[in-house]
Every structure is written in structure tokens, then in C-alpha cells.
Image: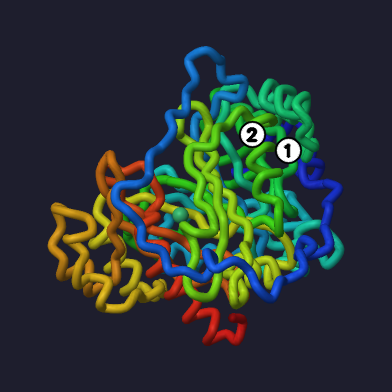
Amino acid sequence: MRPTARGTDGCDLFIEVIKLKSATQQKPHRVAEAGNKLFTLNNIPMPAQTIKETSPSTQTDFLPLLGTDHIEFYVGNAKQAAHYYINAFGFQPLAYTGPETGVKDRASYAVRQNKLTFVFTAPMKPNNVIAQHVHQHGDGVRVLALLVEDARAAWKETTARGAGSYMEPITLSDDDGEVVLSGINLYGDTVHVFVERKNYHGSFMPGYAKWENPRFATKETGLLYVDHCVGNVGWNQMNRWAKFYEEVMGFRNILTFDDEDISTEYSALMSKVMSNGNGYVKFPINEPAEGKKKSQVEEYLEFYNGEGVQHIAMATNDIVTTVRELMSRGVEFLEVPASYYDDLLTRVGHIDEDIAPLRELGILVDRDNEGYLLQLFSKPVEDRPTLFFEIIQRKGARSFGKGNFKALFEAIEKEQGRRGNL
Ligand code: FE2
């Protein structure tokens, strides 16, 4: 159904001053003799991952977040990208906007699975910001949209604390009500959009028509919600963006991994996990660290042509069933050596699951002092070695799988080597 009333021309939303920054951050001079510590394989004591509590009782949360609203990808061909996520990941068609709904410069397809909503947007013309984004980065995440009670207040609070404005508050409306949007700039060409939809009853967003194809149906795969979403930033930029999340958005640093935690014989990275006050939204920030060979973050920065979203972790309550289904639909995952499972129970203690299906599917397990988690990482889902997905099932643990870093990063290095990028 075409919207009969709109607060603004939909195009206004997207007339933006894109800052297509020049590529990768300046890399420090690579030293011939970096300290021994970077080259030491890590033996990780268990449990060693204590989450710092997120809600300081003495402070009010100036940016209350209700969760992730949606993630928008700028891609070369939105129709085909949506089809991939529907077929391979089990998302369901939700909404569409494009020439048929009066939008001339783009086509956008929204898909949904439980609390996960992805939007794929492709340019119709060569000179708009979407086309420039795809030209610079390939397919990738443009918008990390956060659900808020008050999008005007979210914009006011964050810009007052130093955020660059991506979008001043704007109201979109149709027969189903109204949505207020605002936005701020994030690392690279990525942005946060604040979505206030308490007065909206439509399927997705004013300006979108319902999208369905009754002759075509795929089953969901048990993916539930965004667990966390990781950004890769340039050399020496991790603390800058951790500070941004602290000062501009009121987040806290709940975990830090240094280059000893996340290093193999060859490559290293550092990471800080930032969480909002209620813990609903977590954004780890990675930066490369010096190693003998090229870090996976360096490879990303080179091929994404700048900073951006590295991986999106999607939660499931039954990782064995979900991963088996994803694999049968063509999603490719990283493989760890079979020896990973030989002493698994010695490392992580008792778990409810049988080891056989975990070994068969390559699912990783890690424990912290609150419980354990199961996780698995896809290969990149586009031609460039950039964005990938994590599938995660938490059984008490609130950490991120530190005990798996070594096996995981060695698997990533193997793939890097196959691409000639190690
Ligand atoms: Fe992750």
C-alpha cells in the first residue's frame, strides 16, 4: 500500500553529506623487532573473563536504548542480496520501497526473522551516496539503527556531547502512524540512526509497502536477535571510539582484550567491548596490532577501504539445529582443526550438548565465570573479505569466547593465506 501522507519527502532522508574518507587509517611504521609477547601463543586461564557491571546506580542513562531496531546494508543489488538472506539465513520478506512506491534514487528490501530486521538498499543512479558507498566499500553495513523512546532527545543528547549529526530529527508518517528518526556519525561511513516507533503500527517504516510473495516461502532458521555488532577501526583508533561510546552515548567498557589475548604466532588485534546501560546493545571495537604478518583487521581495512562493521552476532537458542540448517542452505563457516575437540571438556567442563554434533559442525565452546557459550563464525558473505556473521548461543556466559580466539584466528589466517593476504 502506498503511503498517503508523509511528513517529508522520503528522499530528504537520504540527502546527506557523505564523508567518504580516504581509506585506511595511517598505519604506524612496522618495527622489525616487535616484542616477544606478540608472537607468543596464548594459554588462556579459565575462567578469566569477568564482565564489569553496566549500570552505575548513581547515574541516569541519558541515552536509554531499547535494542537494535534494524541494520541497513548498502549493496550493489538489493533484490538479490535480500534473496540470499531469505534463502540462506531464513529471513522473511517484510517491506519494500523503490520506484513503485515513489522513491526514485534507490530500491530497499526489508527482511525479518524474530527480532532481527535487515534492510538492503541499492542505488538507482551512479552519483548518489549509496552508489558512492558501494563503490568505496563493496556491500556493507551503512546504518546501525537503535530503538529509542525519544529520537529527538537521543539526537540532542548525543550531538550536545560531541557526536557529528548525520540526520536531524525527522518525522515520517503514513496511514499506520508516524516514526521519528535522527542519526549521528560513527566510525568510517557507518552511522547510528535512532528510531522512535511507539506511534507506528505498520510493518516497517512509512514509505515502505508490504512485501510478500505467497508463491515462495522459506523456513526460518532459529535466529533471534542481534547479540553484538563489532566494528573494525584503524591503527590506534580503538580508544578514540571507546571514548566516543563512553562520552557521547553513555556506554561502558565491560571487557578489554589486548594483543596478548588476541594473538597467534602471526597476527594480532586488540578489542574493547562497549555496552549501553541496560546491556541490550553491545559494540566491541577492534583495532589491528603488530604481528609477524598482516592482521585480519588490516585485511578488512584494506578491502573495505576504511573502517566499518566487521561482524554481526546473531543469537539462537539451538545452535546445532540453526547451524545445520544454515549449512544445508549454503552458508559457509570457518573450520577449526579437529584437535580442538580432543580436550574440549577438560577446558570448558560439563556442557549439556553432545560433543559429536559440535565436532561435526565445527561449533566452538567457551566458558566464563557465569556459564558457557557456543559460537561459530561464517566466512565473509560478500566478494571482498569484509563482513561476516557469528552465530551464538549463550548458556549463562555474557563474554565473547576469549578461549576460542586462538583457534578462531588461526582458522581466519588460513583463509587469509588462501586469498594471498597474510
Ligand atoms: Fe563476536
Of 35 and 280, nearer the camera is: 35
Residue at 49% across, 20% down: 56
Above or below, 88 relative to 111? below
Q: Is residue 351 left or right of residue 48?
A: left
Q: Can the viewer see residue 124?
A: no
Q: Is residue 182 visible?
A: yes
Q: For numbered disc 1, what is the local secondary structure? A: strand
Compared to residue 316, the image places residue 382 above or below, namely: below
Residue 177's image quarter?
Answer: top right
Q: Position of residue 181 (x, y in %)?
A: 68, 33
Picture quadrant where residue 31 is located: bottom right
Residue shown at 59% from the left, 81% from the top? 422
- Image x and y of residue 344, in percent: 21, 64
Q: Is residue 257 left or right of residue 354?
A: right
Question: As rendered, which of 363 and 218 lies closer to the eye?
Answer: 363
Residue sitting at 64 percent across and 34 percent down?
194
* x 47%, y 61%: residue: 389
Sequence-earlier tag: 1 or 2: 1
Instruction: Give the spatial CA distance, label 1 vs label 2.
Output: 8 Å
Number of the front mark, 1 or 2: 1
Q: Secondary structure at mark 2?
A: strand
Q: Which mark is residue 194?
A: 2
Circle 2 crowding by C-alpha within 10 Å: few under 14, some 14–19, many from 20: many
Colour scheme in use: rainbow
Check residue 184 in the rendering and tell me which mark sits there, or answer none. 1
Which kind of residue does numbered mark 2 sit on?
Answer: Phe
- Estimate the x, y position of residue 82 in percent, counting from the top left: 53, 63
**In this picture, residue 379 sits left or right of residue 167:** left
Q: Nearer the viewer, residue 37 or 287?
A: 37
